[in-house]
Amino acid sequence: MRWIKRNILLLLGMIVALGLMAGAIVYLTTRIQADIKASKNLKAAQTQLITLMQSAPFPDQANLDLATRETQRLTQYMTNVQAHVTYPEVPKLTSQQFSSYLLTTVADLQKAAEQAGVQLPAPRYGFSFEPLREQVNFDAASIEPLTRQLLEVGNLCTNLFDSRIHKLESLKRVRVSTLDPGQGPQYLDKAVNPTAYNNLATVTPYEVVFTGFSSELAGVLERLQRSPIFYSVKIVNMETLKVPAPAPAEPAPAASAPKGKAAADTTPAKDELYLFEQPLRIQLFVEVVRLNQAAR
């Protein structure tokens, strides 16, 4: 202890020196690791450069000009696509306004179905929005996607009703709100890809099942093609509904012929054909394609 008191300055100097040496060792180790990492990155960059130099096509001026022309062609193609992939303006609504918009749209669709003679699955059918009709308050994040879906469902059903389908059996959509329950016949199965996003477009799937003849199916497809909303028809499944053919009319009783003349034969020919089309149950799987703002 007496030695320490006499040489306190020397002892403090030794401690400081040891600390500096430890710091120097840590710094040296860190720099060595950084140097090793930089050497690996440099070697990888050299390997990549050699690969590019030996690649075909080589990035010379001719190939760069070709890439520029292809980029211009792609830009022109996107411009042409934008003229066909149309989408109407979506209103900006508050929670109360959306609630009113939902009830009004459903009521208008029910009235349109009645006027077109289209049978609905239920008297108060909600067109896949049954769980939301009793809601009054909607969170702000759900209003816009629900408004878009309501606009798309309304347009899709209007095309069906204008085509005079016989019966709308079901309509399914994807969940876009926390208010949409986890289960329900009005929602697409979880295995179906929900609203898909990329840098160019937003794709929203729908499934609709209805009955009608082939002429009604042709009318639906034609109206979807002319719709202000761009639809991509992915699947068309058809099932023939067994309906008994109408019975042939009873032949009229033969009139008595005058004396000396034979009575006219009114029995229909055995090979007479009747054209009778069976109604169809049609399943359509369609996707609504909406360009993102960045792609417009």
Image (cartoon, rainbow, N blue to C red):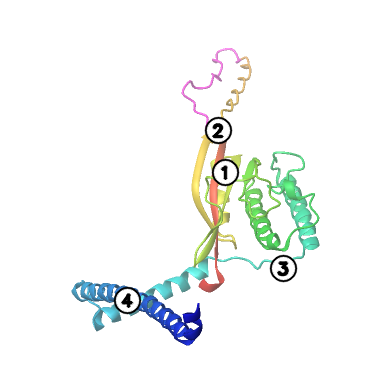
At label 1, counting other C-alpha atoms closer than 10 Å, the crowd grade (few under 14, some 14-19, many 20 or more) is some
Secondary structure under the numbered disc 2 in the rendered image = loop
Secondary structure under the numbered disc 4 in the rendered image = helix
In x, y percent, where is residue 30? 37, 75
Q: Which residue is drawn at 69% across and 47% down?
A: 127
- Is residue 275 highlighted in magenta? yes
Front residue (pair 2, 278): 2
Secondary structure under the numbered disc 3 in the rendered image = loop
Q: What residue type is labelled 4?
A: Ile
SS majority, magenta = loop
At label 2, counting other C-alpha atoms closer than 10 Å, the crowd grade (few under 14, some 14-19, many 20 or more) is some
Q: Earlier in the sequence, mark 1 or mark 4?
A: 4
Q: Earlier in the sequence, mark 3 or mark 1?
A: 3
The residues tagged by marks 3 and 2 sit, at their Cα atoms, a distance apart of 45 Å
Q: Which residue is drawn at 71% across and 67% down?
A: 91
Q: Mark 2 points at which residue?
A: 278
Mark 4 touches mark 2? (CB < 8 Å): no
Report the mark closest to the observer, 3 or 1: 1
Q: Earlier in the sequence, mark 3 or mark 4?
A: 4
Q: Which amino acid does label 3 sit on?
A: Lys
Which label belongs to residue 32?
4
At label 4, counting other C-alpha atoms closer than 10 Å, the crowd grade (few under 14, some 14-19, many 20 or more) is few
In the image, taking residue 91 as reference, residue 33 lies left or right, namely left
Q: What stretch is highlighted in magenta?
A: 257-276
Front residue (pair 161, 123): 123
Q: Which amino acid does label 2 sit on?
A: Gln
Which label belongs to residue 92?
3
- Is residue 192 highlighted in magenta? no
In the image, taking residue 28 as reference, residue 94 lies left or right, namely right
Q: Mark 1 points at which residue?
A: 189
